[in-house]
Image (cartoon, grey):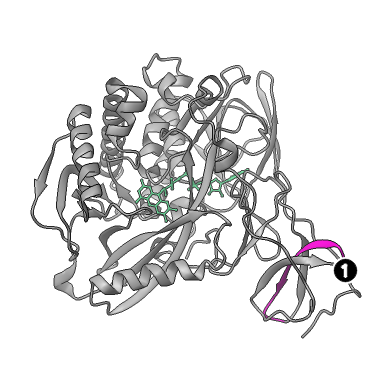
């Protein structure tokens, strides 16, 4: 099983072994490109650049697929969360067409890699079905269809939905796919290493200094590289250059249902947040994977309720034999509906970022890898401006940035009895005029941390489902003992030694 950034186990995680790199870091070498982050974005970009003759090194602070790629649901869809009709209204018809084209190229890239490198990742082509359930959703779906047509994507009404739910209209769109994301990423990682690429796991990139070459500080010492790509969502240590994204969590369950109830399509409803469904073969067994119940990171009182809601919803639709996996993961929603892919401003065209994919990262990661390869090779492309991470600085259309990234929604209570905390539980509270994050481990030890996030000092909150500390401002996350799980923070929580003021055992 591979590790992931939470306590819950994803279907992919339990069906994969940790990746063991073969090639070794050469500290005396100046690499052409250093890539930070071993999810689908980092590994896809590394492979494409190595294929293009660049010498690449990829650094991952944990092991490959520790982040969202290990917790995704891996619909490969050319229907972005922000529909083509909205993209067309915001950015123009040509922009919507470019997004559609680049999504198709990204799916094509995945298909080619799977064929070329013979990757056994259960890939299957699929159609997508989206269904509406009331007049307002019918209107939206009409607009979706018109947007698809304008963007050059064929779609048609159908009178059946694979998910047994009352619906008023159902739209079918061809050209999608589904796969096992961890097996795919490990497959392209092997291909990357075979052609000379280097992967270093458990290596955190801490900061970099501009120059030629760039000097990159890591937990394994420093190294030099001509270009740097952050495939880490928000780049760590780049305060002031962070593209405006809001961190969200989405919930997924894998379950077994009667054999005749599995279906081949990718299916979506139009609720807000929407539910998504699809099936996958894993080790000779079929699973239904359903997702939804999304919310801003750190802004739900009890995250276990999200699983309850999702499970109740699924049980109304399917005769569930067994829920085998429950997990949640993180995605970053861009301010204007398009991802941020490209060179960071003020970094001489040498430092790149790829983030803000919303729920479309399987496809936008491919878009990012193709675009970053072009940018590093100084090839011209119409996508540069469209996806520029710096566009928010020139465009003032979306003014609610502070609102999206607004601070914590929950008040902090006084801790009256610090010793009263059950094993496995955590809480944030005021004690002795100090704001603490407290966790009691299974041995009864009480671990205490300063509850200020290390990014911008927002108050973290306890996530009881994933057993993590989550920051409601920008989505940084920490383990029960304060170890950094997700950026943009780049340091662990501060541990406090309040003994003997607080009793250690219950
Ligand atoms: C529940 C859920 C379901 C989803 N379903 C879909 C779907 O069906 N289809 C779809 O297209 N998208 C989906 N998404 C979105 C998609 O999963 C993500 O956008 C995608 O996995 C992001 O990949 P990534 O490589 O950019 O990031 P990640 O997979 O998160 O990889 C980033 C990596 O960077 C590492 N890292 C961070 N900081 C550092 C550092 N300083 N030094 C070294 N390494 C570092 C992390 O450990 C991590 O492994 C879903 C998201 C969620 C949450």
Residue 217 among magenta residues: no
Q: Is residue 380 above or below residue 480?
A: above
For the view shown, which residue lies furthest in the left direction? 159
The reply to whether residue 165 is in sight is yes
Residue 38 drawn at (x, y percent): 51, 45
Q: Which residue corresponds to the image point at 10% horizontal and 57% vertical from the top-left?
A: 160
Residue 166 drawn at (x, y percent): 17, 63
Q: Which residue corresponds to the image point at 40% horizontal and 69% vertical from the top-left?
A: 309
* Beta carbon of the mark 1 residue lies under 8 A of ligand 1: no
For the view shown, which residue lies furthest in the bottom direction? 506
- The foreground one among 433 and 503 is 433
Residue 339 drawn at (x, y percent): 44, 34
- Determine which residue is flagged by label 1: 498
The reply to whether residue 232 is in sight is no
Kindly state the secondary structure of the residue where label 1 is placed: loop
Name the side, left or right, on which 396 lies relative to 80. Answer: right
Q: Which residue corresponds to the image point at 63% horizontal and 43% vertical from the top-left?
A: 488
For the view shown, which residue lies furthest in the right direction? 500
Residue 61 drawn at (x, y percent): 61, 48
Name the side, left or right, on which 91 lies relative to 151. Answer: right
Name the side, left or right, on which 494 lies relative to 38. Answer: right
User: The C terminus lies in which quarter of the figure?
Assistant: bottom right
- The foreground one among 67 and 165 is 165
Magenta region, residue range: 432-443
- The foreground one among 209 and 193 is 209
Residue 433 among magenta residues: yes
């Amino acid at each position: 099983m591979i590790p992931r950034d939470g306590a819950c186990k994803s279907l992919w995680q339990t069906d994969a072994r940790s990746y063991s790199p073969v090639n070794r870091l050469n500290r005396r070498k100046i690499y052409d490109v250093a890539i930070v982050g071993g999810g689908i974005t980092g590994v896809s970009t590394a492979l494409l650049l190595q294929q293009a003759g660049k010498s690449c090194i990829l650094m991952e602070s944990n092991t490959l697929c520790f982040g969202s790629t290990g917790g995704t649901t891996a619909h490969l869809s050319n229907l972005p969360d922000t529909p083509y009709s909205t993209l067309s209204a915001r950015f123009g018809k040509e922009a919507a067409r470019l997004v559609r084209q680049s999504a198709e190229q990204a799916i094509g890239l995945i298909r080619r890699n799977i064929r070329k490198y013979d990757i056994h990742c259960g890939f299957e082509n699929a159609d997508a079905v989206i269904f509406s359930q009331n007049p307002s959703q019918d209107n939206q779906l009409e607009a979706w269809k018109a947007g698809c047509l304008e963007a050059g994507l064929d779609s048609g009404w159908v009178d059946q939905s694979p998910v047994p739910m009352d619906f008023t209209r159902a739209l079918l769109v061809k050209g999608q796919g589904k796969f096992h994301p961890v097996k795919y990423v490990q497959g392209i990682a092997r291909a990357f290493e075979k052609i000379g690429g280097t992967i270093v796991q458990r290596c955190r990139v801490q900061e970099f200094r501009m120059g030629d070459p760039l000097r990159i500080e890591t937990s394994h010492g420093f190294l030099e590289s001509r270009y740097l790509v952050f495939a880490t969502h928000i780049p760590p240590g780049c305060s002031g250059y962070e593209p405006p994204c809001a961190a969200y969590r989405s919930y997924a369950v894998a379950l077994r249902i009667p054999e005749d109830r599995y279906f081949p399509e990718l299916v979506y409803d139009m609720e807000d947040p929407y539910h998504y469904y699809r099936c996958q073969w894993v080790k000779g067994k079929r699973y239904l994977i359903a997702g939804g119940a999304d919310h801003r990171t750190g802004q739900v009182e009890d995250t276990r309720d999200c699983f309850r809601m999702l499970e109740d919803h699924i049980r109304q639709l399917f005769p569930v034999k067994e829920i085998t996996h429950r997990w949640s993961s993180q995605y970053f929603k861009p301010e204007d509906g398009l991802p941020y892919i490209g060179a960071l401003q003020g970094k001489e065209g040498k430092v790149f970022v790829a983030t803000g994919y919303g729920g479309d990262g399987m496809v936008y990661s491919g878009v990012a890898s193709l675009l970053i390869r072009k940018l590093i090779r100084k090839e011209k492309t119409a996508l540069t401006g469209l996806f520029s991470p710096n566009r928010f600085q020139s465009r003032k259309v979306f003014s609610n940035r502070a609102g999206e990234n607004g601070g914590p929604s929950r008040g902090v209570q006084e801790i009256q009895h610090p010793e009263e905390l059950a094993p496995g539980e955590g809480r944030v509270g005021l004690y002795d005029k100090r704001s603490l994050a407290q966790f009691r481990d299974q041995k009864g030890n009480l671990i205490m941390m300063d509850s200020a996030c290390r990014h911008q000092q927002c108050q973290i909150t306890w996530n009881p489902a994933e057993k993590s500390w989550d920051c409601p401002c920008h989505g940084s996350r920490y383990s029960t003992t304060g170890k950094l799980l997700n950026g943009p923070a780049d340091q662990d929580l501060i541990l406090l030694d309040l003994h003997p003021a607080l009793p250690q055992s219950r």
